[in-house]
C-alpha cells in the first residue's frame, strides 16, 4: 500500500508540472468563469434559474471535454513509460507491478477529477457569497456523475495504454474510441436502427451501452424526469429502470465499466513484455 501511494504521489507531482494539466485546469475554470460572466445564473430555462442553470450547462460542456482529455493524457502513461525505458529501471526497484499500475490510476484520477470538481465547487462558493440559492441535491448528483465519468474513461484509457506498444498508437486508439462513442449517440444510432428495423428495446439497450449516452441521459433526467426530449425512447428507459433506478444505473454502470477496463488492462500489462 505504501508503494501504491508513493507511485500515486509521484504521478500527481509529474502531472502538476505538465503543460496539459495547466491547460486542463484553465479550461474548466474558464468555463465556470464565462458562465458567470454571461449571466447564466440570472437566466431561466425550463424553470431552472440561478446556479441550477449554470450547473446544467456546465455538466453538458464537461461531458464533451472531459472524456477526450482523460483518454489522451492517460494513454500516454503506460505506453510513454514503456518507450522511455522506465520499466527497465522499475524492475530494479522494490516496487511491485500492481503497486505501480494502480498507483498510476489513483494519482491520475485525483489529477483529472480535482480541477473539474473544484471549478464546480468554486461556483457554489461564489453563489453562496452572492446570495444565490444552491441546489445541493443537483450539486451532489452532478459531483457523483463527474466522479464516475472520470473513473470510466480513466479505466478505458489505462486499458488502451496497456495494449498499445507506442505512444502514437495509444493516442490514435484513444481518439478513435472517443470518436466512436461520440458518433453513436442518438441520431446516428437511431438512423442505423431504423434502417435495420431493429426492435426499440434492442436499440435503446445498445445506446445505453455507450457511457457517453448514459451520462447525457442522466444529466437530462435531473431536470426532465420524464425524458420528454428523448421522445419514444424515454418510455423504454423509464419502463426498464424508472427515474430513480436510471439515476442509480448511470452511476453504477460507468464506474463498473471503468474498473473492469482497468483490471483487464492490469492483467494484460502484467503478462506483457514490459521492456
Image (cartoon, rainbow, N blue to C red):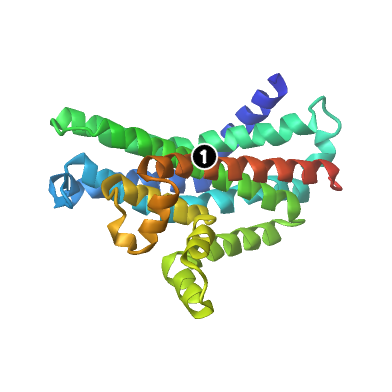
Q: Residue at x 17, y 53 (%)?
A: 45
At numbered mark 1, what does the secondary structure look like: helix, strand or loop? helix
Depth order, front residue of 152/21? 152
Q: Residue at x 18, y 49 (%)?
A: 40
Residue 85 in view here: no
Q: Position of residue 18 (x, y in %)?
A: 55, 43
Q: Position of residue 66 (x, y in %)?
A: 46, 50
247 in relation to 128, above or below: below
Q: Position of residue 32 (x, y in %)?
A: 29, 45
Quadrant location, the N terminus:
top right
Residue identifier under label 1: 252
102 in relation to 267, above or below: above
Q: Residue at x 28, y 44 (%)?
A: 55
How many residues crowd mark 1 within 10 Å: few (<14), some (14–19), many (20+)? few
Depth order, front residue of 145/154? 145
Q: Position of residue 138 (x, y in %)?
A: 30, 37
Residue 117: name its quadrant. top left
Residue 97: name its quadrant. top right
Amino acid at each position: 500500500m505504501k508503494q501504491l501511494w508513493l507511485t500515486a504521489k509521484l504521478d500527481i507531482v509529474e502531472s502538476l508540472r505538465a503543460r496539459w494539466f495547466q491547460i486542463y485546469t484553465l479550461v474548466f475554470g474558464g468555463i465556470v468563469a464565462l458562465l458567470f460572466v454571461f449571466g447564466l445564473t440570472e437566466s431561466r430555462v425550463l424553470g431552472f434559474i440561478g446556479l441550477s442553470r449554470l450547473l446544467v450547462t456546465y455538466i453538458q460542456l464537461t461531458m464533451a471535454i472531459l472524456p477526450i482529455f482523460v483518454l489522451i493524457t492517460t494513454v500516454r502513461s503506460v505506453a510513454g513509460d514503456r518507450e522511455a525505458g522506465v520499466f527497465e529501471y522499475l524492475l530494479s526497484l522494490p516496487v511491485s507491478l500492481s503497486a505501480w499500475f494502480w498507483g498510476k490510476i489513483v494519482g491520475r484520477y485525483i489529477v483529472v477529477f480535482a480541477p473539474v470538481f473544484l471549478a464546480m465547487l468554486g461556483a457554489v462558493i461564489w453563489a453562496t457569497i452572492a446570495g444565490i440559492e444552491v441546489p445541493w441535491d443537483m450539486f451532489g448528483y452532478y459531483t457523483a456523475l463527474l466522479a464516475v465519468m472520470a473513473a470510466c474513461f480513466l479505466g478505458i484509457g489505462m486499458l488502451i495504454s496497456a495494449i498499445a506498444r507506442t505512444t502514437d498508437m495509444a493516442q490514435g486508439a484513444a481518439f478513435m474510441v472517443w470518436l466512436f462513442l461520440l458518433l453513436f449517440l442518438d441520431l446516428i444510432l437511431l438512423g442505423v436502427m431504423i434502417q435495420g428495423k431493429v426492435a426499440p428495446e434492442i436499440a435503446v439497450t445498445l445506446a445505453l451501452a455507450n457511457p457517453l449516452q448514459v451520462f447525457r441521459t442522466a444529466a437530462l433526467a435531473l431536470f426532465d424526469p420524464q425524458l420528454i426530449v428523448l421522445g419514444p425512447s424515454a418510455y423504454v428507459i423509464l419502463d426498464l429502470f424508472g427515474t430513480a433506478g436510471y439515476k442509480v444505473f448511470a452511476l453504477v454502470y460507468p464506474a463498473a465499466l471503468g474498473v473492469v477496463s482497468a483490471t483487464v488492462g492490469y492483467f494484460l500489462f502484467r503478462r506483457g513484455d514490459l521492456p
